[in-house]
Image: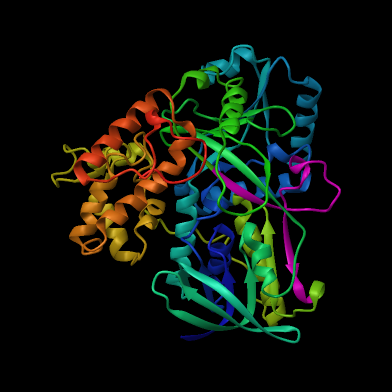
Amino acid sequence: MKLKTEVLIVGGGATGVGIARDLSLRGIPCILIEKGDLASGASGRNHGLLHSGARYAVTDPQGAIECIAENRILRRIAPHCIEETGGLFVSLPEDDLCFRDQFLQSCEAVGIPTRLLSRDQALSIEPELNPELLSAIEVPDGAVHSFSLVMENAMDAEKMGANLLLHTELTSLLLNKNKVNGAKAKNLISGEEYLIEPSFLINATGAWANQFLRLAGLKIEMALSKGSMLITNQRLNQRVINRCRPPSDGDIIVPNETVSILGTTSIRSDEAENFETTPHEVSLLIKETSRLIPSVQGVRLIRAYAGIRPLLQSGEENGDRAISRGFALIDHEARDWVKNLISITGGKLITYRLMAEKTSDLICEKMGVRIPCSTHLTPLPVATQASDVKTRLKKLNPSLSKEKKEILCDCELVERGEVEKILTDCKLKEPLDILHRTRLAKGTCQGGFCLYRLLGVLHERGMAQKDSSNLLKGFLEERWKGIRPILWGDALKEEELIEGIYKGIFNLTSTHPSPLEGEGQGGGARH
């Protein structure tokens, strides 16, 4: 199939869909292609922090200024994607109080509001904190629901005319001298092939930026940094808790819905995919975050996951922590003489809108049009179901509604109707994409007692009649990736129970020994 458009965007993370929405609001036609699902890269693999910028105030003042500005914008345009938690930077006895004083001065210099709390004041608002703490500093951090943010940008862009092609991989670029005349792509599910002829091409692939650029014979200096995180089975803190020291491993705990997310590591990676959280990282994160909240040592973990940060290198940094978390907008006409190619990479989730604005501004400049950005003023529509637990409980209260609701996920109170609406409205072709659009399988059992219910819904709708066993195995494989690194104690016992249920009811056989039979440390699927 041949398609023509003004702008082709490659990459369906927050930046890519942000560009699609920005261009669509300006009336500029665009097509976005993504080889997986939306938010399948770093945009869906982070700790969900709504940065105040305080984390970068000392080491990266410009990045801190961008963060606090975007923090305020997102609170205005996407309040339904944000939990207003507030944040604390905690100083422990082994931390240098000179850094605390420098931190306060740096925050003031870049316009980030702070308040210094005594030990007793900090413990009164966060009782689970380490009682050895010396002081804490309040900052306007928060939590952001990254999947909702990405999905709603994408839905709004589509409503305004953007064409999103998911599970569609870029296979080659057609270059003529100093211009990209076309791009070939293939749908990885249907096999359909596309020839897309854009006036401009945007590389918004994040950690895959150089894989994209190789198709044009180009390269940028990047470092790929793996950040691993752990999810607890309960919410340990009400505010974002940071360690008041230079950024390092295991120095942040982010509350999210009914859980807390322990983060994060920074380990150089050679590739953008096929990575895993290691036992060493799990031990390191528990050790370090338990200095902030001692109860981390005894809490049950329900999942481990990791994302790859694309970091722009200057060649002068000493370690990945020293590399700026800022973003780079690269006009390949000025850099490499390819006049209609632009790369946008680096940055953070919270700066996605700013990255999209700067990219769209450059496109408009090249097109010779003067249409200002409006994404900082135009609210995102509430396109997804309410994710707040209190709201869902109220909705499902039988005394408030006579309508009988069928619940698919007991942990996260996901209704059957919510899933069916997504299946109808989004026209999904890949069942695993359902897990990105709801809270299904994100609770304590991590899908152990709701995935087979989802399979029943798919079967009734004719989406799993011929391949139900493979679909179920696919769901379980995805679940197993996050459970395997933290499998001990109660989690191990529950996994044995769930394995027995699936083997008995669905006659699934293991291709590897069960955990109690001596599963090794190598990779590989279990079911």
The structure residue drawn at horizontal position 30% and vertical position 51%, both measured from the top left corner, is: 472
Residue 4 image point, x, y percent:
53, 85
Work out which quarter of the rendered image holds the C terminus and state it: top left
Residue range of the region highlighted in magenta in the rendering: 306-333
Q: Is residue 255 visible?
A: no
Q: Quadrant of residue 510?
A: top left
The residue nearer to you, when weighing 18 against 423, is 423
Q: Quadrant of residue 181?
A: bottom right
Residue 327 vertical placement versus 317 (above, below): below
Q: Is residue 93 visible?
A: yes
The structure residue drawn at horizontal position 51% and vertical position 38%, both measured from the top left corner, is: 84
Residue 34 vertical placement versus 71 (above, below): below
Colour mode of the rendering:
rainbow
The structure residue drawn at horizontal position 56% and vertical position 18%, both measured from the top left corner, is: 129
Furthest residue toward right:
316
The structure residue drawn at horizontal position 41% and vertical position 33%, both measured from the top left corner, is: 258
The residue nearer to you, when weighing 486 against 518, is 518
Left/right placement of residue 315 relative to residue 471 reads right
Magenta stretch contains residue 452: no
Residue 263 image point, x, y percent:
58, 34
Magenta stretch contains residue 310: yes
The residue nearer to you, when weighing 487 against 2, is 487
Residue 37 vertical placement versus 332 (above, below): above
Number of residue marks: 0
Residue 98 image point, x, y percent:
81, 23
Residue 333 image point, x, y percent:
77, 77
